[in-house]
Amino acid sequence: MTTIGFIGLGNMGAPMVKNLLAAGHTVKAYDIVPELLDATQATKAESAAGAVKGAEMVITMLPAGPHVSGVYMESVLDNAEAGALLIDCSTIDVETARAVAAVAAERGLDMLDAPVSGGVGGSEAGTLTFMVGGPDQAFEKGRPILEVMGKTIVHTGGSGNGQVAKICNNMILGATMIAVGEGFVMAENLGLDKQVLFDIVSTSSASCFAITSHCPVPGPVPESAANRDFQAGFTAAMMLKDLKLAQAAAQTAGTATPMGAAAAAMFGLFCGAGNEALDYSGIIKMIRGK
């Protein structure tokens, strides 16, 4: 069994810790919100540095690039044990992921960027998808631990490539959900039953994850957020964050992404109207003009 330092016990991090504990691993956890430490049975660390000391592996799940850079530069890298593997599961900008990994390498430490897909439900069920960037040997070392928390573990190549995969995936998802919402609203306005449309598009050329798993109208997919007033599995605010990251990366790469830019603009308007906490599929409310 492995001793793991875990930093960041939010909606995603806490269930990940519970799965690690259930698998028999020892977890020392830290979060800046003390109350979150009570949500798991992990050993409580008094600081980020305390969670890192003595750990064979360090996992972080943090909100954004500045948080990751700050925690690694101020706590993790100075306190990590020789030979410890560092895994950042946050979704952040590619530049920060690569910069922090480079500093870790200078210190003789292997680091993986391993952002996830699957939302809170996937975190709780241990069925997350991990998109992992970093050295081959580090990936093989980290794979058994990632498999405790996820169902699909994909090595994407060098450092930062996990973040590239995540933001490309979510740019596609965000734009697709808008198109799905427009299709269902247009069908509704023209008198076509939503179940009939679902039965057609979910089994034909328009089929996609946004339809089959997160259908934005109540009924066809009982597990979708549309059946619970868009109580979030993946919030509109998180989608907007990822779309902004994608636009920044596209600019850096000199890549035109007009659909991605349009999706970012629409989610910006939706969140700006006070809908940040709704599920991202709730964008259909704006399409309806509500």
Image (cartoon, rainbow, N blue to C red):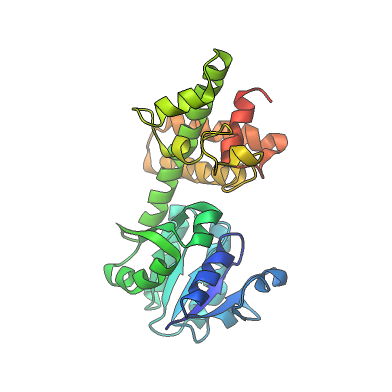
Residue 172 location, x and y as percent? 42, 38
Residue 135 is drawn in which quadrant? bottom left
Q: Is residue 132 left or right of residue 180?
A: left
Labels in figure, total:
0
Q: Can the viewer see residue 47 in this picture?
A: yes
Q: Residue at x 56, y 37 (%)?
A: 281
Q: Residue at x 65, y 38 (%)?
A: 271
Residue 152 quadrant: bottom left
Q: Is residue 145 above or below residue 175?
A: below
Q: Nearer the viewer, residue 156 or 250?
A: 156
Question: What residue is drawn where x is 61% and y is 44%?
Answer: 237
Q: Residue furthest left?
A: 136
Residue 202 in picture, x, y percent from top left: 41, 31
Query: Can you say whether 183 is above or below 244 in the image?
Result: above
Left or right for 52, reference 286: left
- Residue 97 coordinates in the image, percent (x, y): 44, 60
Question: Which residue reaches farthest top?
Answer: 190
